[in-house]
Image (cartoon, grey):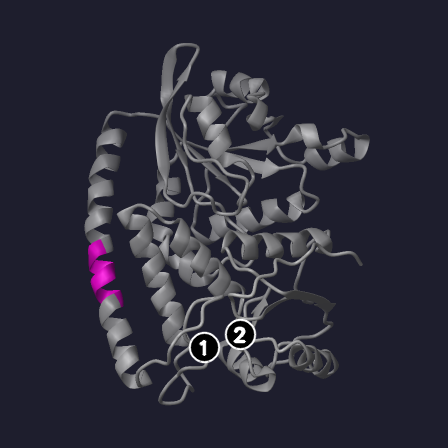
């Protein structure tokens, strides 16, 4: 099975990325899932020297991967003098420690990888605070069971770092910092609540963009509102909620907000930390669910987004916006798949081809649209 060429450099710890097809993975195309994993690594600006992909039929509670696959991995790490391994799946603290001990490497799982991406992508005070809380909660969960120096798992991915202080002192420090950050976040939330009440009092219609990461939400926001919000072809390019006025046929129709993109196995700590921001969805009048129809896993991605919306208790009128339609071949099979999502439209936001969506929005709000 062909793989992309790894990024190689001599100035970083020798790193191996480990893609695992786990039994719970509901993806329609595992190659697309592994591509997403490599994209996460690239987005985090981590250079890696080697990549291994494997399938497991069951999850070992001690090491996550089963004995035979583990022996092969040990041999590979020893032979190539690997210093750190980045795993495509979320691991328990125990699995992470056990893997680190037996491989003699630093281990970073999917949760840590996504947290670091969020940390680098957050720009607003609110976004930075939310990510800091999630990072500290994750760090605290990894302290249990470590020795006095706790040097095994310290540091960031791709960076060699010194050891840490005793875990009791570190745990206390983390808890105090989280409390302070939560107080800071409460002040920010109160300010947003004031703005929200003013908007609701003025009865300004509110549309929110939701969807899987890199589906094209920011690009669509730019097209609909004639804005210039950062829109890059990478995962989690923007985290901070952006709101712009929306005019249609020269008349103000309301406002549109872009929200953080979702992804399969999004760390629970992040969902919890971003609940205050995502609570804006509960006050939306309409959701535009942007879907990258060119991704072979788009049905699974819709399910991922819907599950997170359910977890947030968000149940709002929705239009499915199937974006990047120029990259797919129209067929009867695709039409049958799309027919279950109503109301829907096809767009190519990058080419400003959004006429079907605008036609729907012209008649919103009316019962047949919402």
Along the viewing direction, whichever of 325 and 288 lies nearer the viewer? 325
Q: Residue at x 47, y 34 (%)?
A: 218
Q: Can you say whether 182 is above or below 246 in the image?
A: below
Give the side of residue 57 with respect to residue 301, left or right: right
**Residue 91: image location, x then y, percent:** 54, 72
Along the viewing direction, whichever of 95 and 318 lies nearer the viewer? 95
Sort mark 2 into few (<14), some (14-19) or many (20+) by Cα contacts within 10 Å.
many
What range of the chain is rendered magenta? Answer: 178-184
**Residue 15: image location, x then y, percent:** 58, 69
Give the mark nearest the N terminus, 1 or 2: 2
Magenta segment, principal secondary structure? Answer: helix
Q: Can you say whether 329 is above or below 274 in the image?
A: above
Q: Residue at x 54, y 64 (%)?
A: 110
State the CA–CA distance, disc 1 to disc 2.
7 Å
Whether residue 19 appears in this view of the structure is: no
Along the viewing direction, whichever of 72 and 244 lies nearer the viewer? 72
Query: Which SS class for mark 1?
Result: loop
Q: Is residue 180 magenta?
A: yes
Q: Can you say whether 260 is above or below 185 in the image?
A: above
**Residue 311: image location, x then y, percent:** 46, 54
Q: Which mark is residue 133?
A: none
Disc 1 target residue: 153
Disc 2 target residue: 107
Sort mark 1 into few (<14), some (14-19) or many (20+) by Cα contacts within 10 Å.
many
Along the viewing direction, whichever of 135 and 289 lies nearer the viewer? 135
Give the side of residue 359 with respect to residue 2, left or right: left
Whether residue 38 appears in this view of the structure is: yes
Q: Residue at x 73, y 56 (%)?
A: 3
């Amino acid at each position: 099975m062909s793989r992309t060429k790894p990024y190689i450099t001599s100035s970083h710890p020798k790193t191996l990325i480990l893609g695992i097809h786990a039994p719970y993975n509901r993806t329609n195309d595992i190659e697309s899932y592994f591509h997403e994993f490599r994209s996460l690594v690239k987005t985090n600006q981590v250079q890696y020297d080697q990549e291994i992909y494997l399938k497991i039929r069951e999850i070992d509670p001690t090491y996550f991967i089963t004995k035979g696959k583990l022996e092969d991995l040990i041999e590979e790490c020893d032979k190539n003098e690997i210093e750190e391994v980045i795993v495509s799946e979320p691991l328990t603290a125990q699995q992470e420690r056990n893997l680190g001990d037996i491989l003699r490497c630093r281990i970073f799982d999917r949760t840590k990888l996504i947290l670091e991406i969020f940390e680098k992508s957050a720009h607003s005070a609110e976004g930075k605070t939310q990510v800091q809380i999630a990072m500290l909660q994750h760090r605290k969960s990894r302290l249990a069971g470590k020795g006095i120096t706790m040097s095994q798992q310290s540091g960031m991915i791709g960076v060699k770092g010194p050891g840490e202080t005793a875990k009791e002192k570190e745990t206390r420090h983390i808890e105090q910092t989280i409390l302070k950050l939560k107080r800071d976040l409460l002040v920010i939330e109160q300010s947003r609540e004031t703005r929200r009440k003013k908007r609701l009092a003025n009865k300004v219609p509110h549309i929110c963009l939701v969807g899987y990461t890199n589906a094209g939400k920011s690009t669509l926001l730019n097209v609909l509102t004639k804005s210039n919000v950062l829109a890059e072809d990478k995962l989690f390019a923007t985290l901070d909620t952006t709101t712009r006025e929306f005019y249609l046929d020269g008349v103000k129709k309301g406002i549109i907000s872009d929200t953080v993109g979702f992804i399969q196995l999004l760390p629970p700590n992040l969902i919890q930390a971003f609940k205050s921001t995502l609570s804006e969805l509960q006050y939306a009048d309409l959701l535009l669910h942007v879907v990258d129809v060119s991704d072979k896993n788009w049905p699974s991605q819709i399910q991922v987004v819907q599950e997170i919306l359910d977890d947030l208790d968000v149940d709002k009128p929705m239009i499915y916006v199937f974006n990047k339609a120029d990259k797919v071949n129209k067929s009867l099979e695709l039409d049958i798949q799309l027919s279950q999502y109503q109301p829907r439209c096809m767009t190519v936001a990058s080419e400003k081809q959004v006429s079907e969506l605008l036609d729907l929005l012209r008649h919103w709000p009316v019962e047949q649209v919402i």
